Amino acid sequence: LWGWIVFFESLNIEKDIKNTTNEFTDRYVADDGSSALVTFKTTDNEKSISIRSNNKTISAIQKKQTSDEIIYGNYDFEILSKTDTIKITQGNNVIVLKKARVQ
């Protein structure tokens, strides 16, 4: 019996070791010139986005994906990612971010 318990515990540890995480960060710019760092993260279990600007970060998990856009959501806001544009909607407030060009 104890041998089986050790076997099952080692299976869990092996699975944890095999979990993979991919993430990348790009700089985006709003219409008013302010910038934000946008990080896209993919794990074995979920895809998420986090947006950091002015020392504040919002994060959301992926809710839906179509052929040309990804929708993330969390609490009372929605984040739409499409090609090089991010659109953040919270109530009647909308912020559009465009991927910064590399100089």
Image (cartoon, helix red, strand yellow):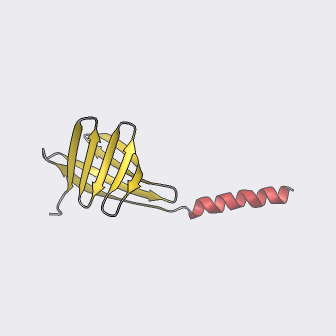
Of the 4 image quadrants, the one containing the C terminus is bottom left
- Relative image position of residue 46 (x, y in whole percent): 47, 55
- Relative image position of residue 34 (x, y in whole percent): 17, 45
Which residue is painted at 79% across and 55% down in the image?
5
Of the 4 image quadrants, the one containing the N terminus is bottom right
Give above or below for 53 relative to 64.
Answer: above
User: Is 15 or 97 nearer to us in this picture?
Assistant: 97
Which residue is painted at 41% across and 50% down in the image?
63
- Relative image position of residue 71 (x, y in whole percent): 35, 52
Which residue is painted at 72% across and 56% down in the image?
9
Q: How many marks?
A: 0
35 displayed left or right of 1: left
- Relative image position of residue 16 (x, y in whole percent): 60, 58
Question: Which residue occupies the extreme front position in the image?
Answer: 66
Give above or below for 18 relative to 35.
Answer: below
Question: Which residue occupies the extreme right position in the image?
Answer: 1
User: Is 24 or 97 nearer to us in this picture?
Assistant: 97
Quadrant in the picture for residue 47: bottom left
Quadrant in the picture for residue 41: bottom left
